[in-house]
Amino acid sequence: MRVFSVTPPRVLAVYAHPDDADVAAGGTLAAWAKHGAHVELVIACDGAKGSHEADTDVSTLRTRRADELKTAASLLGLSDVQCLGIPDGEVTNSMELRERLVRLVRSVKPDCVLGPDPTATFFDGVYVNHRDHRELGWALLDAVAPAAAMPLYFPQTGPAHQVQTLLLSGTHEPDVVVDVASSLDDKVKAVVAHQSQVTDDPQWIRSVLAARAEGAGREVGLRFGEAFRCVELAR
């Protein structure tokens, strides 16, 4: 385990649902944005099924979650945020999705791409990783390595671009930690902004997020950290 101390100049984060990036990597995205990085966030799903109430109006929830996403991105200081509008539960590692992701990578030209680790399925015997997370994770891996870097893949999406580093969150095999001591409060505010999903007291949420960050940071001597599986695609 080591500290990932580099601030990539250009960053693309790709996650499944409107609140996923904030929970998984909000501290990292905010810290890098503070240090001058150009950070863009892409969310695959519209979030309209994110309720346990059967009588939920999905159109209203879709709009609300889109607004929450924009608010959270602003709190993190991101350069841009967009949603692909895929219905919850319908993400598939398809040719169409890979093409969309390759187009994004070639357009943004990120040095570093963040997303969910698709190999992580079961957590502590109490949680099964959402299918959207796993399918998006595989599609993102396939889009970045090797498609986006090789010009004969999806030539209609623009010139090839080689991503230098992949950071995968929600992983069972973390090997790097990003220092988020300067941005933990920004992460908390962004998570709390998803009011349709977060009903607990903000102070309790902060305590939970801080405890997780302390655990990750402890591994490498940091006060607060976020852990990732790192893949160096180019050196």
Image (tube, rainbow, N blue to C red):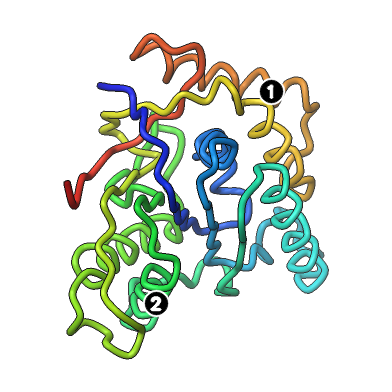
Q: Position of residue 167 (x, y in %)?
A: 34, 44
**Among all residues in the image, which is located at the extreme bottom?**
156
Residue at the (53%, 62%) spot, across then down: 42
Measure how far apart labels 2 and 1 are at the Cα level. 36 Å
* The image quarter in which residue 158 lies: bottom left
Q: Check disc 1 and give the amino acid type.
A: Arg
Tell me which corner region of the image, top left, top right, bottom left or bottom right, holds residue 102.
bottom left
| Pointer 2 with pointer 1, Cβ within 8 A | no
Task: Give the structural element (helix, strand or loop) at label 1.
Answer: helix
Q: Is residue 127 above or below residue 154?
A: above
Residue type at mark 2?
Answer: Arg
Q: Position of residue 103 (x, y in %)?
A: 39, 77
Q: Is residue 186 above or below residue 110?
A: above
Q: Which residue is mark 1?
A: 206
Q: Position of residue 209 (x, y in %)?
A: 60, 25
Indicate the quadrant where residue 47 lies. Answer: bottom right
193 shown above or below 226:
below
Residue 228 numbered mark, or none: none
Image point 25% across, 66% down: which residue? 142
- Label 2 or label 1, whichever comes before in sequence order: 2
Query: Relative to 202, is 149 on the left or the right?
Result: left
How many numbered dots are placed on residues in this image? Answer: 2
User: Tag 2, which secondary structure?
Assistant: helix
147 with respect to 140 (left or right): left
| Residue at the (77%, 31%) spot, across then down | 200
**Residue on which the image places disc 2:** 103
50 with respect to 44 (left or right): right
Image height check: is 92 above or below 158? above
Q: Quadrant of the N terminus?
A: top left
Q: Residue at x 22, y 44 (%)?
A: 231
Mark nearest the camera among 2 and 1 is 2
